[in-house]
Amino acid sequence: MENKPLIYFLCTGNSCRSQIADGFLNSLGGEKYEVKSAGLEAHGLNPRAVQVMKEAGVDISSHTSDVIDAEILNRADYVITLCGHADEHCPVVSNPNVTKWHWGFDDPAKATGTEEEMMSQFRIVRDSIKHRIEQFVQEGK
C-alpha cells in the first residue's frame, strides 16, 4: 500500500470546521492524502455542518467527533488547526518532521439569528474552507 501523507485537522470540538475540512480533503484529494480530524474535546457532529456539506455534494454524515489521538498526532505529516483555541492549546507534537499550520476560520456554530442566517454563516465558512483545501490540493501548501 502506498504511504500517503497524513493530514490531521484539529479544532476545539471536532464538530464543524475540522469535519468540513476533512470532508473536502477526502473528496478533493483523498487519492493523494490520508485524512483525519479531531478536537481538543468531542462535541458531536454538528447537523448544520452535515447539511451544508450535503449541499456541496459531500456526505460527512458518517463522520464521528473524536478527541485528539497522540499517536495520530505524532505520525501526521501535517497538523492543521482551524480555530485559534485549538492552535493555542494543541498538544505538543514531539515529531520534528510534522508540519504545523494554522488556518483560522470563524466558528459557524457561534452564529446567531434565524435558521437561514445561521445556515448562511455555515455556508460562508464551508466555502472558505473548500477554497483553502483546493489551494492545498493544487499547491501542496
Image: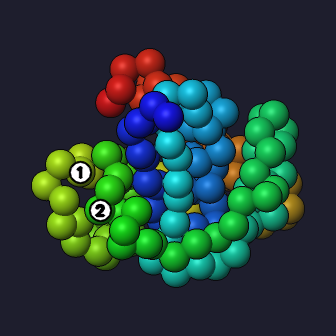
| Within-10-Å neighbours for mark 2: few <14, some 14–19, many 20+ | some
Q: Which amino acid type corresponds to the residue marked 2 in the rendered image?
A: Asn
The label on residue 118 is none
Q: Going 51% across and 66% down the picture, which residue do you hit?
A: 38
| Within-10-Å neighbours for mark 1: few <14, some 14–19, many 20+ | some
- Image coordinates for residue 23, horizontal then vertical, percent: 65, 45
Residue annotated with mark 1 = 98
The quadrant holding residue 88 is bottom left
Whether residue 84 is visible to the viewer of this picture, yes or no, is: no
Whether residue 4 is visible to the viewer of this picture, yes or no, is: yes
Residue nearer the viewer, 94 or 119:
94
Q: Quadrant of the C terminus?
A: top left
- Image coordinates for residue 132, horizontal then vertical, percent: 48, 34
Q: Going 19% across and 59% down the picture, which residue do you hit?
A: 95
- Image coordinates for residue 66, horizontal then vertical, percent: 58, 72
Q: Is residue 112 above or below residue 29?
A: below
Would you say 99 lies left or right of 129 here?
left
Instruction: Name the residue at the top extreme.
Output: 138
What secondary structure is marked by label 1? loop
The label on residue 74 is 2
Q: Is residue 49 above or below residue 59?
A: below
Spatial distance from mark 1 to mark 2, Cα to Cα?
Answer: 7 Å
Point out the tag, 1 or 2, that comes first from the N-terminus.
Answer: 2
State yes or no: discs 1 and 2 in contact (Cβ < 8 Å): yes
What secondary structure is marked by label 2? helix
Q: Is residue 67 above or below residue 48?
A: below
Q: Which amino acid type corresponds to the residue marked 1 in the rendered image?
A: Val
Instruction: Name the residue at the left extreme.
Output: 96
Would you say 33 lies left or right of 75 here?
right
